[in-house]
Amino acid sequence: MRIAIIGPPGSGKGTQTYRIASKFNLKHIVVGDIVKDEIRKKTELGEIMFSYTNVGKFVPSEIVMKVLEKQIQDLSGFDGYIIDTAPINLDQMQAMEFIPLDAVLSLKIENFDILRTRILSRLICPKCRRVTSVSDTENNLCNNCGAELEKRYDDKIETINIRLKQYEEQTVPVLNEYKKQGKLIEINAENTRQEVFEEICEKLNNFFSKTL
């Protein structure tokens, strides 16, 4: 099972990817975390990436592909992989042609006000990378590992609006291409986390039972 998950910022990709990887024994590849780790370490590559993400722009495809390629080389002990979030534009899609994808999950949310509210209230664990909401924690500590939660540096309204616009202009055409290829699985991400997960599992099982 080699899949990718794509959705606008705030659609729950991080939460769902973790659960999908655990249930189906997939290697969990988070493109955003790879980028953030490079930025956090202040490597030469990270400094280049930061110059884009700090103003809400996508990191160039050739840079993302370099780090993504390393992640899929070792799949020992796994039954495949799930990539979160790539490709996010047609250029990236073309650059990812060497990475096999059986299916692409699309987390759909048409009301962007829901996304803005979710993003502005979310927190991230710097240790285990779990994403949670302010409403889900009373002591600002991660429910998974106990580390102190942090606000993402790019979770501000100006950057959010830029990212949502870029999603409509650059990422939606990618989803349309995967739909033409018969690989797209659309999920209603406006439902609760559990409902979204159950729909994902049902549709993945149905999709792969037909392709085996």
Image (spheres, helix red, strand yellow):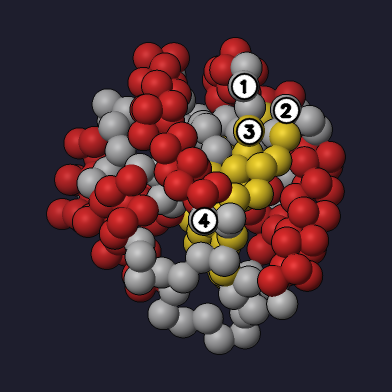
Q: Image point 52% across, 56% down: which residue?
A: 181
Q: Which mark is residue 110?
A: 1
How far across and down, in percent of the image, does residue 152 sit? 46, 32
**Closer-to-camera residue (194/148):** 194
**Closer-to-camera residue (140/175):** 175
Q: Image point 30% across, 38% down: which residue?
A: 58
Position of the C terminus, as image quadrant, is bottom right
Determine contact: label 1, label 3, CB under 8 Å.
Answer: yes
The quarter holding residue 128 reads bottom right
Q: Secondary structure at mark 4?
A: loop
- Closer to the chain start, of discs 3 and 4, is 3
Residue 131's place in the image compared with 201, above or below, is above
Q: Which residue is mark 3?
A: 108
CA separation in Å, label 3 and label 2: 7 Å
Q: Residues within 10 Å of mark 1 (few under 14, many from 20)?
A: few
Q: Image point 42% across, 17% down: which residue?
A: 161
How far across and down, in percent of the image, does residue 24 sit? 73, 69
Q: Amino acid at mark 1?
A: Glu
- Closer to the chain start, of discs 1 and 2, is 1
